[in-house]
Each structure stands twice: as structure tokens, then as C-alpha cells.
Amino acid sequence: MKFALALLATLVLGGTANLIRGKHATPHSQTDEQWNSQVPEINNPKIQERTWKDGSEYRYLYDGQILTGMPDVHLQFAGSRVRAIVKIQNNGDKDVMQIEKVFVGSLHERFVSDPRSMIQLDAFEPMQEQDAPFEEVLKMPVRFTVENGKVDNFEATETDPSWSINIKRAILNTFHLSLTDKEEPKDQTRRETLKPLRAEQSNEIKPRPTKTAGQQTAEDDQDDYFTVVEDSIAGRCEVSYLVLEQPANKPEEIYPIYENENETKSEQRGQSQRQSAGQELNVLNVTKTFDYRNCEFQPFVFKGIHLTSTCPGCESRPEDFFNILESAAHTRYNITGARQSTDYLIESAISAAVYKITPRSHFAGSLVAYAGAEVTLIQSGPIKGPINFPETNANQIDGLHMINPRFERREGEKFLYEAPEASRPIVQLKKYWPNVDEKPRKVKALFEKLVQGMEEKEIKSDTAVLIEHIIHLLEYSFEEEIQQIHNEIKTVSVAGVEKEEIDHMFADLLVSTGTNCTFTYLKKLIKEKKIQGSTVIDVLGALPFRMQVDKISGVMLQEMSELCMDESVSASPFVERACWLSFGTFVHKACVHRPRAEWDQVEAGQNSPKTQGTSRASQQSRQSSPRQSGARDQPEFENRLCPADVRQTIVQKVTEKLKSFAEDDEKKILIIKVLGNMGLEETIDELAAIAVDMTEPIYIRTQAIYAMRIMGLKYQSEEVLEVLLPLYRESKNPTQIRIAAFLTIMSSKPDLPLLEDIAQSLNREVDLDVASYVYSSLSSVANSTDPCLQNLTRDARIALQFATPLNVEFRHSKSIQKGTFLPHMKSGIFWEQNTIMDKDAPAPRAANLRVHANVNMKSFDIVEFGFETEGLGEAARKFLGNFTTENLAEVISGRAARRPRAAGQMPVESINEIDQLLNLKPQEPKEIRGSAYMKIFGQETRFVVINPQTVSRFIVDLISQQESVIPKLMSGEGLKVDNRRVGMLMDSKLEFPTILGVPIGFTVRLPIVTGMKGLVKASMTPKPEGGLAFFKQMPQQVALEMKVKSNIAAELHAKLSVYIGFLRVGTGCRTKLSLNMPLDGKVDFSLADRSTKVTMNLPESPVKLVKMAYYPVTFVTRHSKNSVTYQPKNIPQGLEGQRRTGKAGQTEQDSSSEEQSRQTGQAKTDRALMLDIDEVETELLTKTGHVSFPKWFNGLPVTIPDLWEIATPAFIKSQDVNFQIGHDSMAAKLEVECEHEYPNTRLSPLYLPVVGAKSRLEVKLTPKAGAKKVTVAIFERNEFAVQSEQELLNKLKDKVEGITIKNLEKPSVPTNYEKMPKMGRSLQVLINAEGGDAVSAWTTRGLLAYLYSVDGRYVKFVGAMDSKVPVLAKKICFNGELRYPDRTGLWFTTPQEALNKSIQGQAELFWGDDLTAEKQIKLRLRYQKSSEQTQVEKFDLYDVNGIPVPLEVASEVREGEALFTSLYKQCEEDRKIGAPFSKECVDLAIRYSDLLRLKFDVDYKNVSPYMRKVLHKLEAVAKGVYHWNTEVEDVEVKNPENKISAVIEYSADRSYVDIKYQTPTQNVTINNIDLPMDVQPASALFPWSPARLVGLQDQPSCTISGPKINTFDDVSDFMPLSQCYHVMVKDATDDNLFAVLVANAAKNSLAKV
């Protein structure tokens, strides 16, 4: 059956393809007949001159075609065609070319069998001259010279637009040959590799001896195969020639370069022409192949966010991104004449090229463009009439490569473009460019529709598309036009949208445009205070990221600095902060991330401005640095748009401001961060001075150190290392300083010797926080998969061999780096978390989280958050005991008064006496200092400074001002929330030339709109007073009510397109995304009742929370200079699918009728293959696969593209994932529908969808009919009881009285458990889905509690649920227990007498109406020691850090052979001297009581099929992920029914885990699963108790055992005690809160405290 279906599909496809081929093979179609009748020389050439001769005229037929599509998916293509008659006149001195007749058309086909061949002309829909004046423009002549086959001195008329110039340059590029004049590459290394190659050829090609580079021989002109460097439309690249010369009297030996019928006829026609002309001339068959991988110059355009932060150590060169582009091209010639002469004539040339964009990898698919061009001589002879070339308007343009004009200015009705290759600006007349009129009215119409779309209930992704149209118009607008547009925007008014939000959205669009004109206009608005507050901050924060690098100039930097010093900015500290940070980013992009084309090469040995601009220390370090020694021979480059003198001026101006802020920490930190954003080497000296200044606060010094991190990333500067290494190595420096120095050192990717030195220093490190942080950081780097850290990863692995392993604990500082890189996707995501702990507080002293990505082998930061503090721990303790409004500022500053001493505490006088005897001075109180920041793409955009002044000012402003947030929240009116943002989140473009001269571009654009609107209210009981009296009484109940609608809509367009004047064709992938999150409810917090109640109002109708559609398309956009640019609002709304045709005089049409006519036409001509498309159902797709734009775009001034979804045949594989959370009987349910279709006939192994795949995701919330709201109440209880368990349980379930609780069938309760003191905690949940708020009204209620004896040896778990919802079980009951072993002997264990005591546990789960045994699950578990663990303990193979020696080593070690001191031996020595509880003995007991093996058995009855399916799928996923670690035995396995047994066993070093389990039908073993995080094993020593939950090993402790003492920082020493009191620990602050004294009660007795 499958074979029959496949055969049928093959026949259908083959038959239809034959129809198409048959149609295209028709010798005389209507369009061809028109051309043949108007130009009869096409069929009957008139060749009177067979050589390139002065005074002669040559006419050629030119055909150019380009098709774009995704052939990996389907043979559907969109393309364009250019046909023209080209006339060239050889005037001797300067030759002239003019195009006489032009055809330009577009093609959109469902099936193209051979996209590489030239398609018949009638398949293309022509562009009418009245809509697109192609012929008028292309007829403008050009002038050039030809010398030795080289085309040079190209000149065009002043009014010739750039796209027309490029087409003409591409035609002349065909006549550019290097048969006699050969040029070698400038690179000497390339010359050696490009020696003339001559392989063994057939009879036609005789082998000749090779020559070395630079030699000249008599046979130079006879090379059959050689490589040269040649100018072409694609740049200055290497070109290989294959030349075959044949005599004319032997046509059978002519090299067969033609393959199809038409080409063969063309060659036969050329032979007859030569014979009729009576000329016996030789024929040259020349094949010219372009190597675009080896180019000295390529005319490309690139813009994108990667220039903000590139891979560390890599240059910021857009050329590097060409690895996503693969291109190949060649041209085959038939030439009449001898190659030694210069008067040979090209009879015909056939060019072919393929351009392939691979965004991720070849496994994920590609976007492909096939280009072809044919040039055929149809007439030659004397000049009949000279071509008139206007001498006064000549514009000379160097070379033949494609020009990329840069938009600059306008004069009257002309647009002036600056092209570096042109002798003067190129003039672009408005009539030759579509959509340039009425910009203010156009932008207003689009913007008004944008605002209206954001006010709808659900924002559609079409709204985001409008952003792209608006930005396109603003991008080519001048300042006066922007002013006119803004005046129109001011008149926009939409009900429900505040005027401030409209202004904010327009400012966002100006920022997203990122041109010089929008920058100037925004600067004007800020200075005139037309935009203020948060709008200005958002504008300044986003502006530098949206400005393209080539738009930033020295003038712009000067204007930006003047703006930051203007009164309109400096009046607000937040605006001033945003402005200066933005200025630093501007400098960074201008001076650090300039493309290589903007840099001048500096000869070696010169005193370049770059060398002069750096410090003396930096110069010396570069001369002596081994890192730089290998690069000294490489050419140096100097940024000509940001030279050294400009950089020095900028740095000097900023540092002068820094010195003026000597007493203002906030502004000082601001300038430091600005210097960091700049990333200039010239700032290192100033930052280093701050970093080493001991008088500066720690948090300012660390800011200076972190500011140097970007210099380490960009330059790997030795000067940075010279500053930071001493700071790190000096142990007297504060922990934060040393860790900051190390982190910045690592950013410079240090060499292996330095890493080895750092690793070795850990062996003698006294600061455990530094040691822990450094070791964890090196370990994380050693396991990194980031390609940009390959060398550092390798070196870190070697360096770690010189460091003693550390058991990094929670209480110590550490650095964690995680992430993954997918080579087949050429991308990866990574995150880095750094934590610096505070010994005085449970919270970290400093922490940050950094997320960065690697895409296409380039690394860039995405976002980073962080904070750092001083004195927070000390202030936190005082804050709890001194919290009053009168001394609020003193509490914040850390100078609060001492807390009154309670009765029974040690008198202050006694503590003072201790201080005098020990000569101790109280520590000075520490003020709270710190800062928090946020970075975007490696640049700081937001930060706050925390100190007494800023915090107290913020609190006073927040509480006392009537216009602040708190008064509005507490009022009955509430706080209105109306926040809307629009912009282009991503706008990357890669544009490069084709053999047709027209540029082809790969663009990725992501317009996005976000909206949040609603009302938020808050209330407190009792109601607080105003001002600072707010803190007089703590509220007992807080209620927060909100009704907010949040929406996000976006469209991601990744497309490959070709643009020819008024026509754009292409292919790509379209992703539509919309998120809708309505929040309507109330949250009540009750401190008195320890409860939280959440009430959510349900929507009246289903809400689609998430909608996503991803599918491939081809498109054709036909612009018209006569298109109606603006439609009035009173146009009647059409049917679904209305669209604009873009033709003059036409109005809106119903797309259904147009589609019908299109299909009718296709049926008549058999041009399209309409497959049975199994398409993804989206709002825009019709049954034919076309995209019909709904009435959303009615009346808008946009040209609607002809957009087709690429067809997917029905036999392609697909995956569907559909499930729902909830049930129809519940108040609401969540439905998830996901569909993914794959091209080709195999499922993709990739994690992300391949290019060309189709995906659809929809998440919908559906409320039950009649349901209004759902209330969830949560009660937390923490109780203590000294009597029965029931008494404690009653307290824990006071809100769910009567809930069914079932005891274990065979509990293992310890003796006298009922008389033991017990503690317990519980969560009680009551859910009401019927709209009631009372506690007694519920539809589902539940209890989760645990009870344990005070000693923690017995723990009991209780769970229960009652439900009135039909789909749920009426009752569920869960009970479980854990029993810890007796600790007798655990403190005195030995390797020979190791105690193997296990933890026993069991659990039972019942469900149903009556909780009988028919539906149950029973679990029995045991925590035990593993066999590997027992073996390690037997040989006592733990080192001093508690790390187990591998079992392979342990089995070989014998008594007395161990070369290290074990834990047991150290503990045994301490026991002998009377210190059984020393640190070593405690570590030994902890280590020997860990249980690494968990064994459990599960018995079950009547588990639902749904649960079985879920578990089965989870098991299948686990087996798939760990396929190579898994062994499955499932043949003839007969294990007990309804039973599962499993064993989970950790390795002794806790880095791996093994899992073995048995089911009724299989035995499975999964070995060596790598654990992604540290695992804390169960311990027989520490039972379930507060001590266990905290963990002795996780908290600093000071212990005295016998004569040994172990300090808080884990330092052990001997300190024999006498009968006199010794100070064990005391409060070091001026509060003198406590002191602990210890002494021996008697000789050889235990210590007394």
C-alpha cells in the first residue's frame, strides 16, 4: 500500500513537472514573439565585425534571472527577470554603453523543476513602465575604458540611481577579463599558494612546467589554468581561469560548454556567423571561476547588535559574519580571436551563481538564491549614431564592484547619497524611488492604526508589523520632515490612551530608527523639555544601542556630551545618569567597535596615534609581553573616525568631572561606570588609581575594578594585569577587592603560567571566601563549552592540577558558570552566577547574574544584574532592635543607639573590663553602602547607589510626597497603570552583491509591542498615618487589588530578498507571536492569621494566552511610483482578505475574486502546481497556502506583498503535542495545542525547528460556563506540643476540621513517642471555584504537614484532600514516616568498626470515595551505605578536605602506604589528647554517617491509565536522554505484578548516580548519570531537626574540644585551657551585646562555659 501511494505521488509530481517543462519549452511564446518582432537580430544575428575595433558598435541580448527559495523544503520559488538590449560603442578613447530595450518582471511559482536554468520569459509578470520606470532609468548611458581586456574608469550620469548603476556595472563586469594582464594578490602568502596550477590534461591541454611566484617566462601568456586577483561586481577577489584555444576550422574540438538545446543552437548560430563573415578566427573557450572566500575587498552592508559586544579577543569585523554565507559563481565564454591579442570579441557568456544563507547549520536548512545571466552578441558593425553622454553630469565611480550608497541629505527634490567609490554624491530623483511622498500623512495613518491596535482586547502581531513600515519611512526622513511628522502625530487621539503614552511610543519609534536626523531631533526635544521624566530616561537608555556604528561621528559625540551637561538633563539625577551612561556607550561603539573598513593601517615602527595615546606603562607591557610578541609583526590599525587625540580629549573631559565629585559617591560611581562603558585603554590609568586608593570605600574601588573588565575582554591588556595582580595577591586587601580583581583578570583570558600561579596560591590561601571563589571559578571555566573560551578552558584544566581540591560550601563565596553550546546549531546560551558571602549576614554581600550567548561563533552579553553592599549584616541586626521613626536615618547608617540590655545578661562593665585586659577596641560602625546595576549587551544602562543619603532621601520622597506611589495606592482612586512600548527589538541586515548587480540581503527583524493597562489598589489594617509616621505601627493585614491587562505581540521575519528598484522578491521564515495575560483579582495577606488569600476573577470568554505560528514563505512585493499613498478613513471595510494591488488608479479589491482569477489563469497556462497542502491553520493562511491579509490593513498606505506559504506535501512527518490541564467540570481549564511539521521525510534531531519547518503553539484558558471567580486561601502553621500527637495535629489543621486522615497500617513509632516534645508545620489550602470567599465554603481543601520529635529521630508526614469536583477523587490521604537510627557510637566510629545504620521509611497513599485498599500506593524506603562507600571507608581513603579517593586507587592502597594524612588518623590523635570533638573528628563523623544508597519498593493497585501513560512517557524521555548509559532487559521478564523496585546510588565523590529499577515487564539500569549540581546526601548523624536543616557544616562555628580550638574561619590550633576564664567569642561592635568565656572547671576536666 505504501509503495502504491509513493508511486502515485511520483506520477503526479512527474506529470505536472512535465507540463511545466513542456510549457517552458515552447519555442515561440507570446512574449518572445514580441521581442523577436521588435528585435529581429535575436533570431537572425547581423555580425559584420568579428573583433573589438575602434569605431564599431556591438549589440548584445542580456538575460538576467534570480530565484529565491528553500529547496531543502520544497521547489517553490519567487524570482525576478531582467531582459535588455545592450549597445556598446567602441570610441577608441572612452567607450559608451546604453541599454535600448528593457523588460523587468516577477515570478511566483509553486513548483520549479530546475531553478538553475533560464525560465521562459512569459512565466514572468511584467512591471509596467507607468508604475516602475525601469526602461527610462536603465537607458541612461555609462562611459568606461577597456585596456588589455580590463574595464576601468567607469562614469555614470548624475541622475542615474544606484540600483541602475549596479545593473550596468554587472553587465560590464562580464566583459572584464584578465587573459593577458594578470595581477597577483597583495598578500605574499597568497602568492605562494597561487602558483599557476596545471594538472594532467587530456589531448587538448598539454602539461607545461610551472613557474614560481614573481617569475616571468615566455609561456606566461600560454597558461591554460591560472589564478589572479580581479575586480568584479562582488569585490576584489581571486579568480581562476581555464582557457582552451581551438582553431576555427575544427569546430568538433570546441570545448562543449553548452548543455541544453537553446544553448547548443546559440553556438551553432555563432559558427554559421563566423563562416558567413568569411573569417577564420580561433575560438577561445574560457571558464572564469570566482573564489569569494579569498577577497581583498567585498562591498557588503552589515548592521546588527553584534557590534555592541563581540567575542572576547576578536576584532569587530562584519566580514567575519560571512561564514553564514556560502556563494559560488562562474562564467563561461565563447570568444573569437587569439588570446595574445587585445582585440578579441566576446560572442556569448553564460554566468551562474548560487548564494546560500545558513543561519544555523546545514542540518537545519538554508535559504538559497540561484542567479544566472546570459550575454549573446546579436549585431556588430560600424557606429550608426553616437550615444550622447552628458559630459557636464559625469560622475566617476571607481572599480566595478557594487556601490552601497549611504543616505546623507536632500537638496530640493533630490536625494544625495554619499558613496565612497564615487567622485561626488550620487543624486537620486524622487520619481525613481517608490513611497517617498506624503511621509507625514503616511506615518500618521500607520501610527494611528498602531495605537488603535494596542488598545484592542488582544494585540495582534499585525500591529507589530506596522512598526517596520513606520521605521522604514522615518529612516529616510530629514529633520524638517520629522518635525512635520511629529506635528501630525500630536493630532492623534485614541480613546483610552493617554497623551503621554502616545508621545512615549513615538519617541520609541524615533529611537528605533537610529539615524542622524532622529538623533538630532530627539536631542532637540530633550533640550526644549518636550519630553520629560521616564520617557527621557528610556530614550537615552536605548538610543546608543539603536544607532548604527557608521552613523556615529565625532560631532555626534560632542553633541551628546553637551546634552549631558545641559540644564534640561542635569536638573534630574536620573536623567543625568542615563545620559552619561549613554554617552559612554556611544564612545564605545564609535571608538572600539568600528568596522575594519573605518580603520587606517599604521606601518610597523611608526609612532602611531594609538601608541602615542596610551600610557608609558601600557607601551612597556606591550613590548615585553609574550602575548603581544606574536602580534607585533601584524599590521596595526588606527580608527580614523576616533583617533587618539579625540579619545584623549573625551577621557580628559570625563576624568575632570570625576575629580570634581570628590565628596559625592553617587556621581563618582556614575563617572566610573561611564569610563567602563567607554572601554578605552586610555582610561586604565585613572581607573587603576581609584582601585588602589585605600581611602576610597570598598564599593567604589570594586566599581573601578569591574570597569576595567571590558578592557580585559577587548584588548587582553597587560596593563590591566599589572594593576590587578597585586590587588589579588595581597592577602590584606578586603575579600571583595580580591575577588573583583580575580574576576577582571579572568576576563582578560590569562595565559597558562598565570593560571598555574593562581591555582598554586590556593594551597596557602588564608581567606576561605577567596579560595572558594577562585577554585569554583576555575572549575566552572574548565568545564565550559563556550567556543570563545576554548583556550582558557584547556589552560584552566591544566592549572587545576596544581591546586588542592576544595569542598565548596554554601556559606562561602563561589562562581558558577553553566550553559551549553550546540555545534549543529552554531549557537549556545550561557549564564554565570557570582556570589560573595557576608560573614555578618545570611544574605550575600555581593552577587551578580550574567547571561551571554554565542551565535555563529561570536559571543555577546545579553543581560547582567548585580549588587554589592557594605555593612549590611551589622545594620540588619541593629535594624531589628532599633526600628523607630525617630532614628530611622541612624539605623540605615549603622549608627543606631545600643539596644537596652535584658535582665540576666552580662553587665556592660564586665565586658568593658575584658576589653581593657585584652586591649580590644570596638570596631567603628559601618554605614550601609552599595550599589545595584543592570547591563544590556555588556553596557550599563541602569544603576542605583545605596548609602544613608540616597536611601533616606528615597524613603522620604516615596512616603511624604502626595504625588508618589504610596498615597495613590492607598487612596480609593487607586494607581493607574498605563505603560505601552513599541520598538524594533532586533534589526540585523547582511547585504551583498550578485552577478546581476542587484543586491541580495539577509535580514532579521523583530518588531515588538508591549502594553500594560489597568488599576492597582492597596489597603492596610489598621490604616497607616502619612509621612514618616507610616512606620509607627506595623499593619496586621494588607490587601492588594489589581485589574491589569498585559499584552505582547511580535513578528520575527528572517528573509533572503532581492531588491530591484520597484520590485522585491525573496523567501524566508515568518514567526507570529502574541501573549495575553489578564490579571484581575485580589491578594490578602494577614499577619495575625498567617494566611494568604488569592481571589482571581475569571474572564467571561476563553482567552488565548499564547499564540505562535512559524512557517516558511516566498513573497513578491511590487511597488509603484503612482500608488495611492494614503487612504481616507471612510473607505468601507472589505471582506476578509482584502488587499491593495499597488497599481495606479486601483482601489481595494476582494482577494477572493483576485485569487479566483489567479487560479483561473494558472489553470489555463498550467504554470502552477496546486498540491494538497497540509498547512498550519493560522489567521492569515487560506486553503491554497496564500496569505490573505485581513481588513486590518484596509486604508493604510502600505504595499501588501504577494505572500505564499511554502507547500508541505501530506506525506511529510509531523509531531503533535496536545494536552489540557484541568477539566470541563472545573472552574477553568488550560488547553495546550502544539503542532510541528518537518520538511523532508525524517524527523529532525535538533532541539530547535529547522529552517523551513512549520510550527504552531496555542495556549488557551477556558472558563467554565457560569464561573465567576476562584478563591484560594493558604494558612501556614508552626506549632509546638509536649503531649500527644493528636493535640499537635489539631493545631496544624484548624482550618480544615473534619478532613479525613488515615494512619499507617504498621507504623514504626519509637518508644515513649507520645511523651516526647514535638514540633510541626503545616500548609492548609482551601479552594472555592463557585465564587464564595468564606472559609467554610470550599470545593476543594487540602492539608500538608510534617511532625517531628525534638531530637529529630522520628518524622511523620500527613497529607489529605477532600474535593467536591466530580473529576477529582473525593478523598485522598497520604501518610509517611522516617525513622533515624540511634547515634550511639557514631561519634567514635573507626574504619575497622564502621557503623552501617540506615534510615527507614514508609509511605501510603489512598484515594477514592471511601479510602479502601482497592486504590492505593505503598512505598517502603531505606537509606543505606553503598558498597563503594563502604570500601572507601574501610581503607580510610578520605583526604583532609573530605574528598574520597577513587575506588580504583583505594583497592591498591595498603596500611602504611598512604602518602597523605587521613581524616581518621588526625581524629585519632585528637582523641588521644582529649579532643574527641575537634574539627577533624566532627568531619570524620559527618563523612562516615553519610548514606549514599536509596532503596525503595512500590506496591500499587488500580492506578489510572492516564497516570500510567504519563509515567511511561517520562520514562521514555529519560531513556532517550541517557541512551548510551542505559541497559534494558525486557525479553521474557516476569517480575511481580503491580510492584516497582528501585535502587539509587551516588558515587563516593557524589558526582555521578546510578539508577536500577524493576517493573513487571523490564529490568533497567542507567549508569553514570552526571549530576549538574552538588547533592547533599542523607545523614544518619543529623536527624530531621532544626540543627539538621541548618547543617553544622553549612554555618560557621567555633568549637573547643580538649586543648584544640577551631575558629569561625575553620582554622584549628592548640590552646590548652587553665582554670582561668578565656574569651571564646564576643561581639566586636560598640554594642557589646555578648561575650562567651570558657575555662577548665578542674584539672583534666571538661571545659566550663
Image (spheres, rainbow, N blue to C red):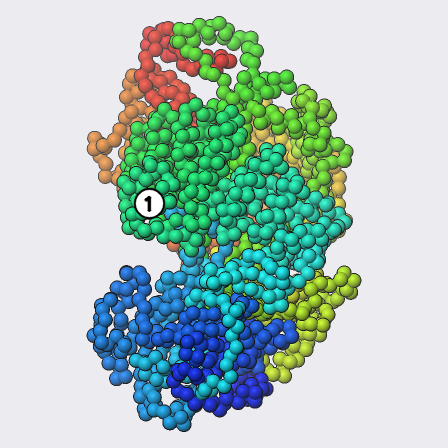
Q: Which residue is mark 1?
A: 607
Residue found at x 47% / y 80%: 88
**Residue 338 point in image, percent of width and height:** 32, 83
**Residue 945 point in image, percent of width and height:** 54, 30
* Residue 1380 in sight: no
Front-most of 497 and 1286? 497
Left or right, 9 with respect to 1647, comes to: right
**Residue 1460 point in image, percent of width and height:** 25, 31
Depicted 95 relative to depicted 1231: above or below: below
Left or right, 452 with respect to 126, comes to: right
Per the image, label 1 sits on a secondary structure element best described as loop
**Residue 357 point in image, percent of width and height:** 46, 64
Residue found at x 56% / y 36%: 565
Front-most of 454 and 704? 704
Left or right, 637 with respect to 896, comes to: left
Residue found at x 36% / y 41%: 612
- Residue 56: name its quadrant: bottom left
- Residue 1407: name its quadrant: top right
Quadrant where the C terminus sits is: top left
- Residue 1070: name its quadrant: bottom right
Q: How many marks?
A: 1
Judge the density around disc 1: few (<14), some (14-19), many (≥20) Cα neighbours within 10 Å.
few
* Residue 131 in sight: yes
Q: Amino acid at mark 1?
A: Asn
Front-most of 1442 and 202? 202
